[in-house]
Image (cartoon, rainbow, N blue to C red):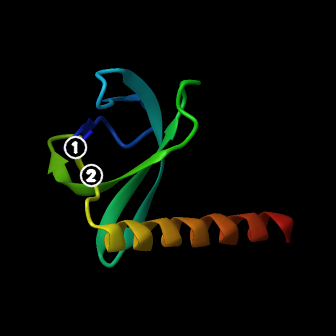
């Protein structure tokens, strides 16, 4: 799923193809900024996918974000940690 394109930044459906050629539908859950880089958290809307995916945003091409896979394990862990911190901060805010 490397270098995929994402349509507008709203709640449009994003279709990504996996390594087996099967298409999956996502929506943009949120954009995280970690170490001055932006990352797109894509949440599945089809029932075949149970987990979301995270891509680095490598700029824009017209009105589309250019997405790239995160190949570096340390970079991946920093982004996942930031996402989890953000997720837990939001759930604590809801409880207050």
- Residue 9: tell me if it is visible: yes
Q: How many marks?
A: 2
Q: Badge 1, how many Cα within 10 Å: few under 14, some, many 20+?
A: some
The picture quadrant where one finds residue 78 is: bottom left
Rendered position, 79 above or below 71: below
- Residue at point 52% right, 65% down? 83
Q: Which mark is residue 30?
A: none
Q: Which mark is residue 2?
A: 1
Mark 2–mark 1 CB contact (< 8 Å):
yes
89 with respect to 81 (left or right): right
57 with respect to 43 (left or right): left
- Give the residue at mark 2: 69
- Residue at point 23% right, 39% down? 4
Rendered position, 46 above or below 42: above
In the displayed orientation, state which residue is furthest to the bottom. 35
Q: Kindly report the distance in space between the C-alpha atoms of the residues bearing marks 2 and 1.
A: 5 Å
Dot placed on the residue nearer the N-terminal end, 2 or 1: 1
17 with respect to 60 (left or right): right
């Amino acid at each position: 799923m490397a270098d995929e394109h994402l349509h507008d930044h709203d709640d449009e459906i994003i279709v990504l193809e996996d390594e087996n050629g099967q298409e999956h539908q996502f929506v943009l859950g949120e954009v995280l900024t970690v170490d001055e880089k932006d990352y797109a958290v894509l949440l599945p809307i089809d029932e075949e996918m149970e987990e979301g995916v995270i891509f680095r945003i490598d700029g824009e091409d017209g009105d589309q974000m250019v997405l790239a896979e995160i190949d570096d394990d340390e970079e991946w862990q920093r982004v996942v940690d930031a996402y989890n911190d953000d997720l837990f901060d939001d759930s604590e805010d809801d409880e207050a």
